[in-house]
Image (spheres, grey):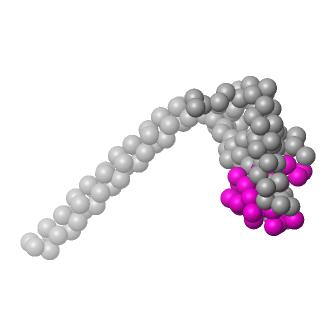
Amino acid sequence: MKDSIEPRIQNQFGAFCAKVLKNEAGCIRREYAHRHDLEKSFDDLTSTELEQTATLDRYFDDEHIFEVLGIPVVVCGDLLAEALAQLPEGKRNVILLSYFLGMTDREIGERLNVVHQTISKRRLVTLKELREYLTKEGFEWPDE
């Protein structure tokens, strides 16, 4: 009797598993059909729709590199870079070495073979020129 029960239970269990798998396969087919109805292939998108899905990284768009004494100096901001580019090389070098590389007037003077008092005067005159240029270009200064 025990021998006749085991095959029957195995058959029932096998039928149950087959039913579960068949139902699950139906659920998966319905899910795929539902997704197919909602999703659209990239090939089917118009150019306007494609533009809406795109993103453009602009990490380095406003970075400009100036070279001072063989050292690359990165300046962020188009307006500032344009203002610096308008300056004669000597004045630009003083500003870049001072404010972007953190050198003192004495260090700059040693590098450029100029007296440090001259560097100080050149920096002050150049800052005034930069301020005038940036103001003329519409830069709004924060409240001082």
35 and 132: which is toward the camera: 132
Examine the image and state in which quarter residue 126 appears.
top right
Examine the image and state in which quarter residue 68 appears.
bottom right
Instruction: Say above or below: 74 vs 133.
Output: below
Q: Position of residue 141 (x, y in %)?
A: 65, 30
Segment tinted magenta in the rendering: 89-113
- Residue lying farthest to the left in this orientation: 1
In the visual, does 31 lie left or right of 104? left
Q: Residue at x 71, y 29 (%)?
A: 139
In the visual, does 44 lie left or right of 86? left
Asked if the stretch drawn in magenta spans residue 111, the answer is yes
Q: Main secondary structure of the magenta part?
A: helix
Asked if the stretch drawn in magenta spans residue 48, the answer is no
Q: Would residue 130 be seen by someone viewing this image from the given angle?
A: no
In the visual, does 8 lie left or right of 33? left
Which image quarter holds the N terminus? bottom left
